[in-house]
Image (cartoon, rainbow, N blue to C red):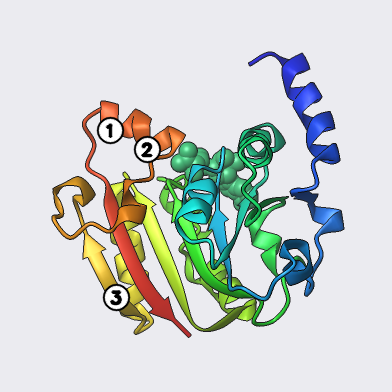
Amino acid sequence: MGNKNKLAKFAEIREFSNVFEHNEAPKGKWSSVFKNDNPIVLELACGKGEYTLGLAQLFSDKNFIGVDIKGNRIWRGAKTATDENIPNAAFLRCQIGRITDYFSHEEVSEIWITFADPQPRDGKAKKRLTHLNFIKKYIEISIKPLIINLKCDSTLLYEFTKEVIHENNFKTLVDVDDVYNWDERPEELNIQTFYEKMWLEEGKKIKYLRFSVG
Ligand SMILES: C[S@@+](CC[C@H](N)C(=O)[O-])C[C@H]1O[C@@H](n2cnc3c(N)ncnc32)[C@H](O)[C@@H]1O
């Protein structure tokens, strides 16, 4: 994608009513964005927002917010939400490490993390989105117990997250190391992201963890 195209998308998302940049996030007032009191679910590292949109279409009784720092990726999801009239999906462009700046205490009910960068170098473990430092931030903005869903291709991120769950006595609700070989796979696990499709083409197995914390 050329630079000009990116800049055009940055300009366009500023006009979208379903995209919030970090400095305009309605902290504590997200329900007013959706005009209802339905539970709020976040998709972190949403990229083009396939999960945010797919879940919003499956579960009309919940509101979904895709969170990513890359405006040109968020543009794709926000444009589709507008074109297809999906009222229970929105997007927030911000650093996930600052998520507590954008949501109030008990504002969130569930989190999805889809194909986040596994940060393979040992020294970078603190950047993994399931590191305890991040989970503590998620707990700060959530109703307890908070449900976290991790869908990924990375064995490293999957095993690392299992260790975090074990070390902190979090409760594993589902642990599947090959999603597409799981007969009881719920419908929401059939949603596929841009990165997931790439990894599937390379023959990678997709893992899924659902756990509760707090
Ligand atoms: C590998 S991509 C996955 C995107 C999408 N979930 C998918 O599966 O196609 C990871 C995404 O995480 C975003 N990201 C990584 N670290 C982030 C952070 N600290 N704050 C916000 N976004 C972040 C990147 O901008 C990127 O879009």
Pick the residue in front: 21 or 100: 21
- Residue 125 in view, yes or no: no
Q: Which residue is mark 2?
A: 196
Ligand 1 picture quarter: top right
Q: Residue at x 64, y 76 (%)?
A: 141
Pick the residue in front: 25 or 15: 15
Q: Which residue is mark 1?
A: 200
Secondary structure state at the residue bearing disc 1? helix
Q: Which residue is mark 3?
A: 172
Tag 1 or tag 3, which sits nearer the N-term? 3
Q: Are marks 3 and 2 in contact (CB under 8 Å)?
A: no
| Mark 3 burial class by Cα count in 10 Å: few <14, some 14-19, many 20+ | some
Q: Are marks 1 and 2 in contact (CB under 8 Å)?
A: yes
Q: Quadrant of residue 23?
A: bottom right
| Mark 1 burial class by Cα count in 10 Å: few <14, some 14-19, many 20+ | few
| Vertical arrangement, residue 52 with respect to residue 63, above or below | above
Secondary structure state at the residue bearing disc 2? helix
Q: Quadrant of the N terminus?
A: top right
How far apart marks 1 and 2 lie (CA) works out to: 6 Å
- Residue 191 in view, yes or no: yes
